Amino acid sequence: VSVLVLQLFVSLALVAFSIALLVISVRQRDHEHADRLALSPLDEDAPTPKDP
Amino acid sequence: MPFAVSPPVVTCPLCVHCSSPIPSGHDSARFCCAGCEAVHGLLVERGLTRYYALAGTQVTPAAVASGRSLVWLEPLVEQVAKYPGALKTLELDVQGIHCAACVWLFNETFRRAKGAAITVNPALGRLRLQWDPQQLELSQWVHEIEAFGYALGPVSRQGPSASTELPLRLGICAAITLNVMLFSVSFYFGLAPGEGELFAIFSRLSMVLSTAVVLIGGWPFFRGALRGLKSGMLHLDLPIALGIVLVWGTCLLHPGADAAYFDTLNVFITLMLLGRWLQQRVLQANRRFLLDDDGAQGLFVRRRRGARVEVVPAPKIRAGDALLIASGDLIPVDARAAGPVLVSTDWITGESSPRELKAGDLVPAGSFNAGHAAFTAIALTDFAQSSLVALLRQPPPAATVPAPHLKFWNRLARRWVAQVLLASGVGFLLWLPAGAARALDVATALLVVTCPCAIGIALPLAYELTQARLRRRGFFVRSTDLLDRLTEVRTVVFDKTGTLTLGHLALAAPAVLEQLGPRARNALWNLVCRSSHPVSGCLQRALERYAPSFDPDAQIVEVPGAGMMWSTDDCVWRLGRAGWAIDGASEIPHAVLTRDREVIAQFELREALRPDAMTELQALRSDGFDVRLLSGDTAQRVAALADRLGLEPRHAQGTLSPQAKADQVRGLGGGVLYLGDGVNDAPAFAQALCAGTPAIERPVMPARSDFFLVGAGLGPLRDALSSAVRLRRVVRRVLALSLGYNTVAVAICLAGWMSPVKAAIFMPVSSLSLLLITIVSLDERARSRPAPLPLREVPA
């Protein structure tokens, strides 16, 4: 039971942490494109023209 | 029934830019439209072809570069320039961003333009720019990025501030719900009270977390219900709030009886929040399509500078400017009348009779010159302080009558809650003999399972989606019930000049102005400066280089449908239709300038048809509409145009006075849609079932305008007609499904076969299903439309 209690504590701590991150993201108004921000900046690759 | 004929399915090569099918017969074998060709050329020229690799198949057809005015940008840049520091920061709204490739394009072009930093928020459609004015001229970059088909504008005044509450609540509830569901798994797999401490921990945790979800996620529903009760109304959230409280109470009272209740309570609340958030997101996204100008950028005003008159965009007006307001012109800012004037504010106040104002009286922004003569007014404020943009956003006074679907919804909403509470009470009483707990279950299930959200959310969403799509295509709805009225349209009547044609006229023989004497030129200048008719606008532009003198005291009268008249001490000048300006009938097909009825000059004018006028009129006829052309222009020119457009001669009439046009529209019976652009069309507007104008820059009759068209094409009109029919079909489907669901669900509950747990699942599922059905029904067909045709002007 003690191991389960520890696991519960860790999982709830993670939930609290994720909620805190969400609150920060929502306040900064970037919650809807946070994934893109995480990937930026994009590297400049060689151009790949679509024009045949 | 219109729309019996489906648009032909196009099987042809794909556009290099957007991969849409290229219409057969199109000039280009590689591009579907001029916009795509232009944008592809820009991407290749500037080495930005990585855009295609990032976009994949998500490229949409590009809009033709609009050359929008950037006068809105100047004051914003001036304002941020006052702040200290080398780097300036500005937020702008943008429309047209649809994928990561667009974001990359913004980043890349801004980086190349030596901008310091850019943050693109595609969900909000917002840019945050940082730049050094020494390194980057911001307007140049905005011009450059708009050439790719995007539209930038000032940050929406409404702001997204209300949008953060629901996503935050939803995020918290979703996180907690997932954990409660994990705990519930242990109950499903046999964790029982006999397990002792573990069961107690899991039960208490479930209860605490569920209570948090009830408080955080249930609050929007509790708040709605409480506000309704405080104001003496039964809010639609009341049954949902009661249902949440009842299920929660059951869980608290019997924590060990059925722990799965916690699970479903959490899922129920989270799904309800998700539905709300989806709706809010769609509505907010729709609001952003319009950006912030509402046509004010296209509004031009005559400004007097000494003896000269210049035409300037309305946002350039400053306090103290002397404005020359022609008959039918809109007053863009609060102004002081320089003499007696007659103005109307009917599109703002609904007051139909014009008001006479004395010299020195305040002429409010948004009123228009209802007299037949131009007048001068002194601007009291800059355009930035004008309330005109806010006024243009308002629906016309006639639109305050609720649309039929709104009336239906209001009636239903008033009775819904009471009936649900009644049904719940009946269910409780019916099942009371079987025990209080069983009766409570039935009552709770009845409260939760009935789903007004389907109608309350799905129907408004369907209207919003349709209006948003039409806005994107250049059709701006002003009357709330227009989409309902459009389904009754059987006849489409067009005015000619400025409606079927672009209204940008050109003199066929400019030398005619060289041959005029200085006095005649001055007279002509004074006449055209006081009229907003396209012919006057064309002559005014052509005369500017002669620097003719302006007489501010000239008493000039505009005769609607005929022309302008100036009685001087020794003669009378007239500019207009030959039949009016010359004594007696005349065969001259052009506008003429006469002095005491003697022809001084004839002005042969060339006009450009709207790019898609021919194809759109043909398409309207093949869709089953009766298409007519009514014009005040000469019968000869109208007949020639009708012949080009393939209209039957009896369906095209010229030399019509404004009243004659109105009589013709009335004679066509109900179901007439009228598209016109000038003050001459006002009586016809009043007679039509619905009316609109493609001349957003000349909103002389917004009181009667149910819609505006922006852009060069007429295509959005047909889109609107077909969208209205499609919308009606979707609305009927949604109503039928909702009615069926609620009837069956209530019957099952009363029969005792529905537990609150099942009800809590069925209700949000039905709500979201109807929402999805609505979105998919409207979206599916929009995607199947053929690619937009190229837009090019063709000579009339």
Image (cartoon, rainbow, N blue to C red):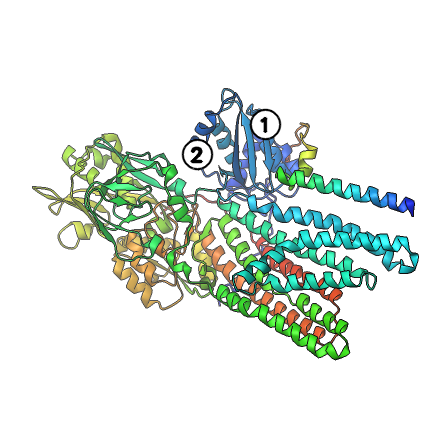
Residue type, mark 1 in image? Ala
Tell me if mark 2 has few (under 14), some (14-19) or many (20+) residues whose alpha carbon lies within 10 angstroms of its own.
some
Report whether B656 appears left or right of B44. left
Residue B258 occupies which quadrant of the picture? Answer: bottom right
The residue depicted at 61 percent of the width and 39 percent of the height is A29
Tell me if mark 1 has few (under 14), some (14-19) or many (20+) residues whose alpha carbon lies within 10 angstroms of its own.
some
Residue type, mark 2 in image? Leu
The residue depicted at 43 percent of the width and 54 percent of the height is B478
Could you say where residue B254 lies in the image, as x and y percent from the top left?
80, 63
The residue that label 2 is drawn on is B70
Q: Contact, CB < 8 Å: mark 2 with mark 1?
A: no
Q: Nearer the viewer, residue B55 or A26?
A: A26
Report whether B514 appears left or right of B668. left
Q: Mark 1 belongs to which subunit? A: B
Could you say where residue B110 lies in the image, as x and y percent from the top left?
56, 28
Residue B288 higher or lower than B490, as above or below: above
Residue B633 higher or lower than B750, as above or below: above
User: Circle 1 — which element?
Assistant: strand
User: Circle 2 — which element?
Assistant: loop
Q: Nearer the viewer, residue B305 or B433?
A: B433
Disc number for residue B739:
none
Q: Nearer the viewer, residue B613 or A18?
A: A18
Could you say where residue B271 lies in the image, as x and y percent from the top left?
69, 56
Mark 2 to mark 1: distance in Å? 21 Å
Disc number for residue B117:
1
Q: Earlier in the sequence, mark 2 or mark 1?
A: 2
Could you say where residue B328 lies in the image, as x and y percent from the top left?
28, 48
Front position among marks 2 and 1? 1
Q: Is residue B70 visible?
A: yes
Residue B235 higher or lower than B320, as above or below: below
The residue depicted at 25 percent of the width and 47 percent of the height is B327
